[in-house]
Amino acid sequence: MLRFSKKLDYALISIFEIADRNGQLPVSAKSIAMRYEIPLELLGKVLQTLAKNGLVTSIQGVKGGYVLNHSLRDVSILQVVEAIEGPISLTACHNENICLCNQHTNCNIRTPMAMIQYELEQFFESISLEELRNRNLRTHAQLFNRV
């Protein structure tokens, strides 16, 4: 089953929370953790990973925290996924150079699976965080207006 980790959830929550502050003061890990009931230590590691991958910047000090390095429209879901989860890998032999699969030489699904992986990567690359956020807001509005 293809499933993303809670770390990816926390990364997206954090990015959207930082964006919602609209460039005001840096947002602390503690404030995000408290607001969304996320374990602070795990969230700290997630934010450090985002910083290491250039998606956010960590600002030290009493009034420190995190700020976005790019607007949401300039960051794709794929960038966040790869920053947190590493490269998308649907099969053990997603990379010809490091295939550890016993069926590698006789595999009859390698090419079709590689095509699916490519399409999945392209799909995630095509959706910006701004678009994802707008989809979320539209969905909430639709649900709210039904009531």
Image (cartoon, rainbow, N blue to C red):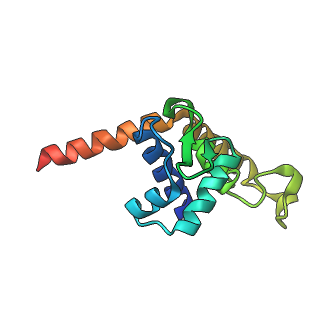
How many numbered markers are drawn?
0
Name the spot of residue 97 as percent of width and height, x first: 88, 51
**Left or right placement of residue 9 versus residue 95 in this view:** left
Rendered residue at 47%/41% (across/down): 25
> What residue occupies the far front of the structure in this picture?
62
Query: Quick one: 89 or 70, which is closer to the camera?
Result: 70
- Look at the image and tell me whether residue 120 can be seen: no
Rendered residue at 55%/53% (across/down): 62
Rendered residue at 69%/53% (across/down): 86
> What residue occupies the far left of the structure in this picture?
147
Name the spot of residue 2 as percent of width and height, x first: 56, 60
**Left or right placement of residue 143 versus residue 108 in this view:** left
Query: Quick one: 44 or 107, which is closer to the camera?
Result: 44
Is residue 13 placed above or below 3 in the rendered structure? above
Query: Quick one: 140 or 39, which is closer to the camera?
Result: 39
Is residue 66 placed above or below 23 in the rendered structure? below
Name the spot of residue 8 as percent of width and height, x first: 55, 56
Quarter where residue 76 is shown: top right
Is residue 84 placed above or below 56 in the rendered structure? below
Q: Quadrant of the N terminus?
A: bottom right
- Look at the image and tell me whether residue 140 can be seen: yes
Name the spot of residue 106 as percent of width and height, x first: 84, 59
Is residue 94 placed above or below 73 in the rendered structure? below
